[in-house]
Image (tube, grey):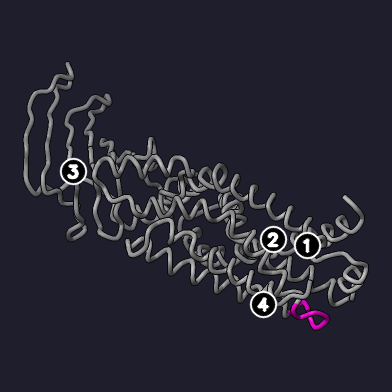
């Protein structure tokens, strides 16, 4: 690596570190003020606050990295242009590609890091956050995702749910085990689905199996129609887990979607989340490419406030477009692949168009 590459990389890395620190700090500050009342109500101590912050940082890092890359690229190249260093480099016959090549290589490495954090760290952190908020603070029995199914215990019942459909207010594939004091199964209740009606879960068809507590032998099987189920959670309690898909890696999410489709369930949300998970690491590269022409078009007129404002504006536009198209994907209006990748494609085309106006 020559002197020019080291100089440009050093400049970029310093700004990137400041941007990541500032964005993470702002995110945590806003999140803290939104949830501080809840923590006070639950009687949380300093340890719970620090645990929450620690497990939140990987998720926040994944979210803000593309915006931090865009801001750093704009400020780096804009700063070099403002001090005439970019002009001097170009006058020496060094091409724009030669100047930005080490930055692009670093952004690719950062995208790989984002993929690793998103695949291995964020799901674990999400599970820990759910346990902290739902179990340690709220005092509820813990919800676990085992082999892509929801399990939790409530008093003398163990409840298993295949799928939560928050929008339709339905549960799919429900099994309830009722136990005695010695943890022996007394009754098993199976229902294909249940709907939330007047804050009570009602199943159209229920199969109840009774077992002898001593021998464990099946004693009786009873079928019933339109029966209430003893599930002590409302749909908000499941939705409050910040979407259980976030607890799964991409491979697990793909397996969940395949299993749901094989069992006849709608796996559109899982497919959209899977493709969005795969598209997310490329967003940083797209933002980095987009930042190059934006920075160079201003030339010596570049300044810090303008660079930050421009980056935030582009980031906000990307977020709005991505959220809207993802919503269409959830509704089934667009294929999952299209919903996840359209925003990246739009901003890549915008970057190419802006590059055509940059003097090489």
The image quadrant that residue 149 belongs to is top left
* Nearer mark to the viewer, of 4 and 2: 4
The residue that mark 1 highlights is: 97
The residue that mark 3 highlights is: 192
Q: Position of residue 28 (x, y in %)?
A: 60, 62
Q: Which is nearer the N-term, disc 4 or disc 2?
A: 2
> How far apart are the two marked residues, 1 and 3, measured between alpha carbons?
59 Å
* Quadrant of the snapshot with the C terminus: bottom right
Please, what secondary structure does the residue beneath circle 4 have? helix
Q: Which is nearer the N-term, disc 1 or disc 4?
A: 1
Q: Residue at x 39, y 36 (%)?
A: 146
Answer yes or no: is residue 65 visible: no
Residue contact between numbered discs 4 and 2, judged by CB atoms under 8 Å: no
Q: Is residue 218 magenta?
A: no
> How far apart are the two marked residues, 4 and 2, measured between alpha carbons?
17 Å
Q: Position of residue 346 (x, y in %)?
A: 53, 68
Number of marks in the rendered image: 4
Placement of 185 over or under 290, stated as above or below: above
How packed is label 1: few (under 14 Cα within 10 Å), some, or many (20 or more)? few
Answer yes or no: is residue 217 visible: yes
Q: Which is nearer the N-term, disc 3 or disc 2?
A: 2
Q: Which is nearer the N-term, disc 3 or disc 4?
A: 3
Q: Which residues are magenta?
A: 297-305
Q: Main secondary structure of the magenta part?
A: helix
> How far apart are the two marked residues, 3 and 4, measured between alpha carbons?
52 Å
Please, what secondary structure does the residue beneath circle 3 have? strand
Q: Position of residue 180 (x, y in %)?
A: 22, 28
Q: Which mark is residue 20?
A: 2
């Amino acid at each position: 690596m020559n002197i020019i590459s080291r100089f440009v990389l050093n400049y970029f890395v310093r700004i990137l570190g400041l941007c990541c620190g500032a964005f993470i700090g702002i995110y945590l500050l806003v999140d803290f003020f939104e949830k501080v009342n809840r923590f006070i109500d639950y009687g949380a101590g300093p340890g719970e606050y620090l645990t929450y912050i620690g497990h939140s940082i990987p998720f926040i890092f994944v979210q803000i990295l593309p915006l931090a890359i865009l801001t750093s690229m704009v400020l780096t190249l804009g700063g070099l242009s403002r001090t005439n260093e970019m002009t001097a480099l170009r006058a020496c016959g060094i091409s724009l590609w030669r100047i930005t090549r080490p930055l692009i290589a670093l952004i690719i490495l950062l995208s790989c890091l984002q993929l690793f954090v998103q695949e291995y760290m964020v799901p674990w952190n999400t599970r820990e956050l759910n346990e902290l908020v739902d179990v340690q603070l709220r005092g509820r029995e813990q919800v676990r995702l085992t082999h892509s199914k929801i399990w939790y215990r409530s008093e003398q019942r163990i409840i298993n749910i295949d799928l939560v459909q928050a929008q339709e207010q339905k549960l799919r594939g429900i099994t309830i085990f009722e136990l005695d004091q010695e943890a022996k199964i007394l009754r098993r209740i199976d229902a294909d689905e249940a709907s939330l009606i007047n804050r009570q879960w009602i199943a159209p068809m229920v199969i109840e199996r009774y077992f002898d507590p001593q021998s464990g032998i099946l004693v009786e099987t009873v079928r019933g129609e339109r029966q209430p189920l003893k599930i002590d959670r409302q749909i908000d309690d499941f939705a409050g887990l910040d979407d259980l898909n976030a607890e799964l890696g991409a491979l697990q999410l793909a397996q969940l979607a395949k299993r749901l489709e094989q069992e006849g369930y709608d796996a559109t949300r899982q497919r959209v989340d899977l493709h969005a998970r795969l598209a997310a690491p490329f967003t940083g590269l797209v933002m980095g490419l987009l930042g190059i022409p934006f920075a160079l078009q201003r030339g010596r007129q570049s300044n810090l406030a303008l660079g930050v404002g421009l980056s935030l504006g582009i980031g906000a536009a990307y977020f709005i477009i991505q959220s809207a198209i993802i919503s269409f994907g959830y509704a089934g209006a667009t294929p999952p692949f299209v919903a996840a990748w359209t925003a990246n494609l739009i901003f890549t085309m915008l970057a190419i168009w802006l590059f055509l106006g940059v003097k090489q």
